[in-house]
Image: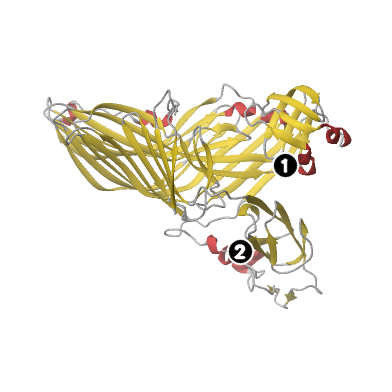
Amino acid sequence: MKQKIAIPCSATAPLLVLLFLVSACDPVTKYTLNISVQGEGTTTPAAGEYKYDSGSEVTITPSPLAGWRFSHWEGDVSGNSLPLSVTMNGNKHVIVVFVLETDEGEGEVESEGEVIIEGEGENAGEGETEGEGESGSEGENEGEGEGESEGEGEDLWEEDSFTYDVELAPGVTVIQGEDLDLLLEVDPDTWECRFDAAGVLARGLDVSVGRILMIESLGFQRIVAVETVGEELVVQTDYATMTEAIQNGTVAWDYGVEFDADHIESFEVKGYGEILLKDNTPIEVEMKIGEYIYRIKATLDNITSTFEFGVSKDLPGPAGAELKASGVINRFRSRDQIDIAEGALQEFDHELTGMRGEATLELIVAATGNDFINLEFPVTLMRVPFMVGIIPVVLNIRIQFVINASVPLDGSARVTSKFTYDSDLGFSYAGTGVQAGGRLGPLEFGDALHETGASSAISANFGVGFPRVELSIAGDSVVPWAQTAFLVGGSYTMFPACQTADAQFIGAAGFDLGLFGLNLVSGSKTLFSEKKELLRAGECDKLYNDYGLEVLFTEMPLDTEI
């Protein structure tokens, strides 16, 4: 049943928010399943972190690489049953152990050197020691269902990988594993922590003033005050950087963002909290901000997400505006590496790869007057959390809208264009400044329509930045946004007579490296920009100038209070 939720208006900024979800608001308890591998082999599901509804049954199947065999299970399970069935009645860590094959082992070694491993795993019957099957790599890619190529087959979907190889700085107290039971409460706004005082003393945890407190799945803060209140130890903290907590080491990941409830945990309306999502449940939001009504819809279809965005302005009579963006985005990957030495950031590489899809923008305006909007929509459409070691990482997927129009009473414009694109976004820091990265692959502009006219000058432009991906590490926004953006616009002037229409595709990213102790290293980079002239009619060479909206997609919009 489709449920409708009304969120009250703010007294300082009138707003109507209607959230439409298909059973998305039912309370659902989720538990985390962490799968890891010792030895050489893979698992189905692949090694990594997953979230499942309480009571779910998860089947894990090991697949050894050539020359290895499955031995047993460790972690929160034991034994050597195949496959393994796990009931998600709590958080679980499952370790599959592979050992080297021997002559007496389960694998049969033939005279020509071919290793045959019995079973139904990804590499069953493959993994020859010669040719393309060496080390079973070919079998691994073929056997995994999601490893098949998307679209025209340019890319293979890879398994997630994580690196957490660090030496903590002196004066760091880590709360993880069983010690988390001693943490009774954490204020998410002030980071005030309440511990079991007797338990902290019994386990010898040093929570004295001045130390860095590093808590699994939360982050790191500096202790500024400690007080015993009854049986509780109240610890006040203040901001600490990642380079104060980690002396040396590497934190890195290659994580695939897929559009399902295992990866997209929730969406969040600013000021009103999160709502958990379920598979096959569309996300729908309707919100009025100022004179415009925004309608947002996105689906979770695993490999892709189909989106429909609408922005409208209703005026008396035939006047008004209808701005639309629709299309599909493919799953993509977040690839980051952080290298720290002697308490200083040496290198930070940020990439979003496989940013592919289609988008169609349509602009229809009539007698709307003057409008200028640069808005980061105050909804996190998709929240993607995962862990790297004990450090929480979150990707927040949002939308940016840009509108710049001057339409007289007798003016109207209609401009559409379809974008088909393949790109990567990214930048790097190596001690001397931030360098733009990214890649603009094949790009097509199609299905163009351009009609603009009035008795005086008119211009109308509409742009959407999506997906607009924020990277947050331990609650700190390191990459406020990295996005692909689409822009269409048209104009008409009388003196000289000129009619124009354009479409533009932009890649841009922002950065703020304060988390690494580099408070002055912040800003933005344009990664690529490609424009298509849809129309030039008249004496446009004398008049035409760039619309100048590209810069809006490379700067952070003003915060929107709701």
Sort mark 2 into few (<14), some (14-19) or many (20+) by Cα contacts within 10 Å: many
Q: Is residue 501 left or right of residue 126?
A: left
Tell me where residue 476 appears, x and y as whole percent: 60, 31
Q: Indicate the amino acid at tag 2.
A: Glu
Indicate the quadrant where residue 314 lies. top left
Circle 2 sits in a helix, a strand or a loop, which is it? helix
Residue 43 - label: none
Q: Is residue 86 left or right of residue 362?
A: right
Sort mark 1 into few (<14), some (14-19) or many (20+) by Cα contacts within 10 Å: few
Q: Is residue 468 above or below residue 558?
A: below
Q: Nearer the viewer, residue 279 or 160?
A: 279
Residue 140 - label: 2
Q: Is residue 83 left or right of residue 525?
A: right
Which of the two discs, 2 and 1, labels the residue nearer the N terminus? 2
Q: How is the image coloured?
A: secondary structure
Tell me where residue 281 appears, x and y as whole percent: 47, 53
User: Cβ–Cβ below 8 Å for labels 2 and 1?
Assistant: no
Q: Indicate the amino acid at tag 1.
A: Asp
Q: Nearer the viewer, residue 395 or 315?
A: 315
Quadrant, the C terminus = top left
Question: Could one spot residue 519 in this view of the protein?
Answer: yes
Kindly identify which residue carries mark 1.
165
Residue drawn 60% across and 35% down?
348
Question: Could one spot residue 343 in this view of the protein?
Answer: no
